[in-house]
Amino acid sequence: MNTPFAHKWIPSLFLPFIGGMIYATSFPMTFAPTFFFGTIIGMSLLFYALAFSKEEMDEQSVWREIFSVLAFSAGYNLLGYYWIPETLKVFGSISFPLNWFLGFFFSLIISPHLIIFVLLHRGYKKLSVKSSSVVSSVSSRNIVYALALTLVEYYTPQQFPAHMGHSWMSLAPHLGLAPIFGAPLYSFLNFWLALSLISRIKQAKTDYLCLSTFILVLILNFSFPLKDLAKQSEMKHNLRLVQPNIGNFLKVSSENGKVYAFKEVYDLYLDLSTKSSDKKIDLIVWPETAYPRLLNSTRMKKDPRFTPRLIREVISRTGSELFTGGYDKSSIQNEMFFETEYNSAFHFQRDGKLKDIFHKMKLIPFGEGLPFGPFNQYLARYIQNISFFASGDKFTLFHTNRGTPFGAAICYEILFSSFIRDNLNSVKEQPDFLINLTNDSWYGRTAEPEQHLFLAKWRALEFQLPIVRMTNTGITSIIYPNGSETKRSKLFEIAVQDVEISTDKREKTVFQKVGILSTLLLVALLALIALALSKFKTLKS
């Protein structure tokens, strides 16, 4: 019954598509629990459709492999990123069915690293000489492929990086190796296990080194669980986290100068921020782009009279410092509003004067800019629903009035370990905690806020750094270095949390110092073990 088309293309498209959907189950969803093995099983179904031997490559073209990756991406996008159409509707004013049609095209760029791997692998097979029996052992091959996949995953720019190894967050706080190796180790292990499953299915060969390593890593992680050392510190700060739950219509109206809207935002922040408290509040924190009107950091640093009345009134009533998101005027001015503003984080001291500022550096493609380089300025004349922010060029180390250093990251900057690592390594003094200002209101009641939080936790583990996650509509909480949290402010509720955060002078983690190099060294050791075992087996036979 099977036609040549069905024989070739159904396994190449259907299995990867199902694999992509299963892969997505390893990350939070609103309608189902997370599945730890989802990434491994999902990637195994994709690997089954790809060609790893010369014989398989002779039977199928590179285009067939690329279509397999796109089918995997489509399944992954359908289940994992179903919130994109909602974002296009709210953020870009694109209604049904066009928003769903455009959302589907995200499948083309959701997994660029896998397409790069396919192309590199094809080139390698064409250029390489015949492998020796030692190098071509099942463990050696799988280690090399798993390492290559980990490297392209780590270095290939991605829009919303949900990596293979991130699924291990479900085991927190039992991730004792995270501060040493970061997420790359867990990605390598998951890729390796997926490849070993394919070796068993296609070649009837068992990669015992993979199975024993996977079990050993599990044992080590559970034997040395992460601890929240910051809670034991004597240095404590009382933070007030203000989640105003300002809807997008009200937010945009207040930003566009509508008086009634601005007054409503003004009153909401004033009332929530100045509520009575049993404890002295040291620092009030507002979310990303909380203050709706354009600010001028140059003027505010010179004279507190240029600080907005709302901020001065809150500080005057509470005697607290204030940290907020907002818009800062750039030196560039033009009629198209192209890069005339920064998405920024402002730190105001107790006299109302601006103490320091951070300009967002990683802008959201198709929301805060376009990824087309020099063509963006031309496109800005015609595309009106994209902000075209200017990008910051330096990291900022903030200090509380008690001298405690802290850092900042805005919105999805927290998702990139290399970005946070650069941040921490570029400042003169190590921050004791980090504030992540976010506005996830554009995504509605979908899984995006949960996914954003889930992935942000990796930065707390990798760098042993408490993270204050302050959002407009939720989810607001403090993430501790072991992956635990304070009580959450739920989605789409007005909430004020007065939270005590304990901080301590933190040392750089191994992962912060060397990045992915620690994983590379471990992989090199595993490769030597595989080589030794292969030689021993050859001599024995």
Image (cartoon, rainbow, N blue to C red):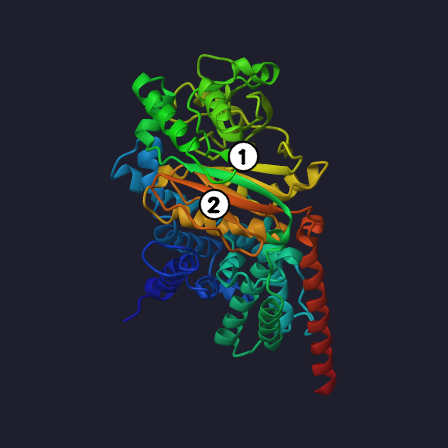
Q: Amino acid at mark 2?
A: Phe
* Earlier-in-chain disc, 2 versus 1: 2
Q: Residue at x 68, y 68 (%)?
A: 526
Please indicate, yes or no, whether residue 267 appears anywhere in the rendered image: yes
Q: Is residue 369 left or right of residue 357?
A: left
Q: Is residue 2 left or right of residue 360?
A: left
Q: Which mark is residue 160?
A: 2
Q: Nearer the viewer, residue 524 or 141?
A: 524
Q: Is residue 339 left or right of residue 150?
A: left
Place of residue 136 in the rendered image (x, y in percent of width and height, measured from the top left):
64, 71
Measured along the vertical axis of the image, is residue 141 above or below residue 476? below
Q: Quadrant of residue 186?
A: bottom right
Please indicate, yes or no, whether residue 123 appears anywhere in the rendered image: no
Query: Would you call the spot at circle 2 few (<14 residues within 10 Å), some (14-19), or many (20 or more)?
Result: some
Q: Residue at x 55, y 78 (%)?
A: 205
Q: CA distance from mark 2 to mark 1?
A: 31 Å
Q: Quadrant of residue 144?
A: bottom right
Place of residue 175 in the rendered image (x, y in percent of width and height, measured from the top left):
58, 62
Q: Nearer the viewer, residue 424 or 260?
A: 260
User: In the image, which is nearer the foreground, mark 2 or mark 1?
Assistant: 1
Measured along the vertical axis of the image, is residue 46 above or below residue 218? above
Image quarter hosting the N terminus: bottom left
Q: Residue at x 46, y 64 (%)?
A: 36
